[in-house]
Image (cartoon, rainbow, N blue to C red):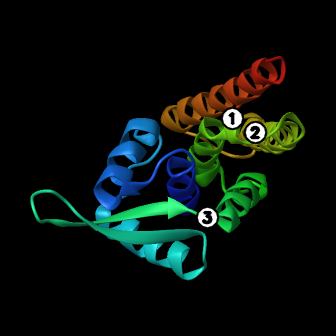
Amino acid sequence: MIELMVLYILVNHDFTMYAIHKRIQEFFLAYTNPSFGALKPALVRLEKQGFITSSKIMSDGGKLSVFYAITKDGLKELKRLLLNPISKNPLQFISDANIKLSCISFLDEEDRIEVFTDIKTNALLHKINAEKILNDEYTPLTTFQKIVLDNSICTYKNFVSMIEGLEKE
């Protein structure tokens, strides 16, 4: 997901690694917080693949800064990443869905519907799985486990409601 976030940040403006990190925090901190240690290799990978370019610019103070820019192939890759099927792993699903939905404005209406459908379908699947566990009379659950499962069900219901609201936009 870090590649998706980087490409999305670079759509409208070129930035330094520090500025990209700051923008990622501004846009995505509620869902994820990648470190500089994760960001630098992502930038290297994206540049190696031709999705971004870098240029070194000397500031007025004599400091060398590296600015990153998205390429035409990077725009295509951003679209591909947004349209990739969402993770089937419930833990990863939540942050991935939030990140994708935060970047959805990049896509046209037809592609948005595809992402909405993917997220909604998986949210319903995860909700059903949690309900099965909660309602299985042969699975002994503690009160804590029941509360966690009930909260998960609510989370997935909220995703479905949110998608239904977004579909009307």
The amino acid type, in three-letter code, at marker 1 is Ser
- Which residue occupies 54% across, 82% down? 48
Label 3 Cα neighbours within 10 Å, binned few <14 / some 14-19 / many ≥20: some
Q: How far is disc 2 from disc 3 in space, using C-alphas?
A: 33 Å
Query: What residue is shown with label 3?
Result: 71
Query: Which residue is labeled 2 in the image?
Result: 123
Q: Is residue 35 visible?
A: no
Res. 42 mark: none
Q: CA distance from mark 1 to mark 2?
A: 21 Å
Q: Residue furthest front?
A: 60
Query: Which residue is tagged 1?
Result: 105
Cβ–Cβ under 8 Å for marks 2 and 3: no
* Quarter where residue 109 is shown: top right
Farthest residue toward the bottom? 48
Give the residue displayed 30% in from the left and 63% down from the top.
Answer: 36
- Secondary structure beneath dot 3 equals loop
Disc 3 marks a residue whose amino acid type is Thr
* Residue nearest the observer in this picture, 72 or 108: 72
Image x and y of residue 65, in percent:
25, 65
Residue 62 position in % (x across, y down) = 11, 65
Q: Earlier in the sequence, mark 1 or mark 3?
A: 3
Image height of 16 relative to 114, above or below: below
Residue type, label 2? Ala
Nearer the viewer's eye, disc 1 or disc 3?
Answer: 3
